[in-house]
Protein backbone atom coordinates (compact mmCIF):
# COMPACT_ATOMS: atom_id res chain seq x y z
CA UNK A 1 0.00 0.00 0.00
CA UNK A 2 1.41 3.39 -0.97
CA UNK A 3 0.40 7.05 -0.62
CA UNK A 4 2.00 9.76 -2.73
CA UNK A 5 2.46 12.96 -0.79
CA UNK A 6 3.89 16.42 -1.31
CA UNK A 7 7.63 15.98 -1.95
CA UNK A 8 7.51 12.44 -0.62
CA UNK A 9 5.58 9.21 -0.22
CA UNK A 10 4.66 6.63 2.38
CA UNK A 11 4.33 2.87 2.00
CA UNK A 12 3.13 0.10 4.30
CA UNK A 13 3.93 -3.59 3.92
CA UNK A 14 1.81 -4.86 6.81
CA UNK A 15 4.53 -4.45 9.44
CA UNK A 16 6.72 -1.47 8.53
CA UNK A 17 5.77 2.08 7.54
CA UNK A 18 8.35 3.69 5.27
CA UNK A 19 8.20 7.46 4.78
CA UNK A 20 10.39 8.82 2.00
CA UNK A 21 10.94 12.59 1.73
CA UNK A 22 12.89 14.75 -0.68
CA UNK A 23 13.61 18.36 0.15
CA UNK A 24 14.65 20.84 -2.50
CA UNK A 25 18.39 20.54 -3.07
CA UNK A 26 18.72 17.56 -0.72
CA UNK A 27 19.01 13.82 -1.23
CA UNK A 28 16.02 11.61 -0.61
CA UNK A 29 15.67 10.50 3.04
CA UNK A 30 13.88 7.40 4.24
CA UNK A 31 12.35 6.85 7.68
CA UNK A 32 11.10 3.44 8.83
CA UNK A 33 8.60 2.95 11.62
CA UNK A 34 7.33 -0.38 12.91
CA UNK A 35 3.51 -0.32 12.97
CA UNK A 36 3.45 -2.04 16.37
CA UNK A 37 5.44 0.88 17.85
CA UNK A 38 2.91 3.52 16.76
CA UNK A 39 0.76 4.74 19.66
CA UNK A 40 -1.60 6.89 17.58
CA UNK A 41 -2.30 8.39 14.19
CA UNK A 42 -3.40 11.83 13.05
CA UNK A 43 -5.01 12.56 9.70
CA UNK A 44 -6.07 15.90 8.28
CA UNK A 45 -7.69 15.92 4.85
CA UNK A 46 -6.28 18.14 2.15
CA UNK A 47 -8.54 20.83 0.69
CA UNK A 48 -8.45 22.88 -2.48
CA UNK A 49 -6.49 25.59 -0.68
CA UNK A 50 -4.32 23.65 1.77
CA UNK A 51 -2.49 20.34 1.89
CA UNK A 52 -3.43 17.86 4.59
CA UNK A 53 -1.21 15.40 6.41
CA UNK A 54 -0.78 11.93 7.84
CA UNK A 55 1.15 11.72 11.11
CA UNK A 56 2.21 8.82 13.32
CA UNK A 57 2.62 9.35 17.06
CA UNK A 58 5.46 7.45 18.68
CA UNK A 59 5.78 6.43 22.36
CA UNK A 60 7.47 8.96 24.60
CA UNK A 61 7.22 11.82 22.13
CA UNK A 62 4.60 14.44 21.47
CA UNK A 63 3.32 14.85 17.91
CA UNK A 64 4.93 17.67 15.96
CA UNK A 65 2.78 20.80 16.22
CA UNK A 66 0.95 22.20 13.24
CA UNK A 67 2.49 25.29 11.70
CA UNK A 68 0.31 28.40 11.69
CA UNK A 69 1.75 30.17 8.63
CA UNK A 70 -0.24 30.77 5.46
CA UNK A 71 2.23 28.82 3.33
CA UNK A 72 2.21 25.58 5.32
CA UNK A 73 -1.51 25.82 6.15
CA UNK A 74 -1.74 23.94 9.45
CA UNK A 75 0.55 20.94 8.89
CA UNK A 76 3.62 19.66 10.72
CA UNK A 77 6.98 20.90 9.45
CA UNK A 78 8.55 19.04 6.53
CA UNK A 79 11.44 18.06 8.78
CA UNK A 80 9.14 15.91 10.99
CA UNK A 81 10.15 12.29 10.20
CA UNK A 82 6.81 10.86 11.37
CA UNK A 83 4.48 12.82 9.06
CA UNK A 84 3.74 13.27 5.38
CA UNK A 85 1.91 16.16 3.72
CA UNK A 86 -0.74 15.09 1.21
CA UNK A 87 -2.70 16.71 -1.60
CA UNK A 88 -6.49 16.70 -1.74
CA UNK A 89 -6.37 14.03 -4.46
CA UNK A 90 -4.66 11.62 -2.02
CA UNK A 91 -7.29 11.90 0.76
CA UNK A 92 -8.95 8.54 -0.01
CA UNK A 93 -5.65 6.67 -0.31
CA UNK A 94 -4.40 8.26 2.94
CA UNK A 95 -7.58 7.27 4.80
CA UNK A 96 -7.15 3.66 3.64
CA UNK A 97 -3.46 3.82 4.59
CA UNK A 98 -4.31 4.98 8.13
CA UNK A 99 -6.98 2.27 8.45
CA UNK A 100 -4.47 -0.41 7.44
CA UNK A 101 -1.93 0.84 9.98
CA UNK A 102 -4.58 0.98 12.73
CA UNK A 103 -5.62 -2.58 11.91
CA UNK A 104 -2.02 -3.78 12.07
CA UNK A 105 -1.58 -2.06 15.46
CA UNK A 106 -4.55 -3.96 16.97
Image (spheres, rainbow, N blue to C red):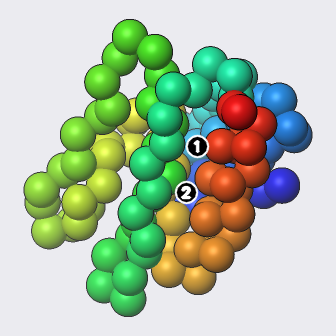
* Residue behind mark 1: 21
| Badge 1: residue crowd in 10 Å (few <14, some 14–19, many ≥20) | many
- Regarding mark 1 in the picture, which secondary structure is present there? strand
Residue 9 in picture, x, y percent from top left:
66, 52
In this image, 72 relative to 16: left or right?
left
Kindly check if marks 1 and 2 are in contact, taking CB atoms under 8 A apart as contact. yes
| Residue nearest the observer in this picture, 15 or 2 | 15
| Residue nearest the observer in this picture, 51 or 37 | 37
Instruction: State whether residue 105 is above or below residue 93.
Output: above
In this image, 71 relative to 28: left or right?
left
In this image, 35 relative to 21: left or right?
right
In this image, 101 relative to 13: left or right?
left
Q: Residue at x 40, y 63 (%)?
A: 44
Q: Residue at x 78, y 56 (%)?
A: 2
- Regarding mark 2 in the picture, which secondary structure is present there? loop
Residue 36 in picture, x, y percent from top left:
69, 22
Marks 1 and 2, how far apart at CA: 6 Å
Q: Residue at x 86, y 38 (%)?
A: 14
| Badge 2: residue crowd in 10 Å (few <14, some 14–19, many ≥20) | some
Instruction: State whether residue 1 is above or below residue 51.
Output: above
Disc on res. 12:
none
Residue 28 in picture, x, y percent from top left:
64, 38
User: Which of disc 2 and disc 1 is earlier in sequence?
Assistant: 2
Instruction: State whether residue 55 is above or below residue 27.
Output: below
Q: Residue at x 30, y 84 (%)?
A: 49
- Asked whether residue 77 appears in the rendered view, the answer is yes
* Residue behind mark 2: 7
| Residue nearest the observer in this picture, 79 or 92 | 92
**Quadrant in the rendering for residue 47:** bottom left
Quadrant of image for the N terminus: bottom right
Farthest front residue in view: 106
Amino acid sequence: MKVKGVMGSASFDGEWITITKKEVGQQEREFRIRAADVTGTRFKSGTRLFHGYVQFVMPGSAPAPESKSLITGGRPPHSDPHSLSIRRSANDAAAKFIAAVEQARA
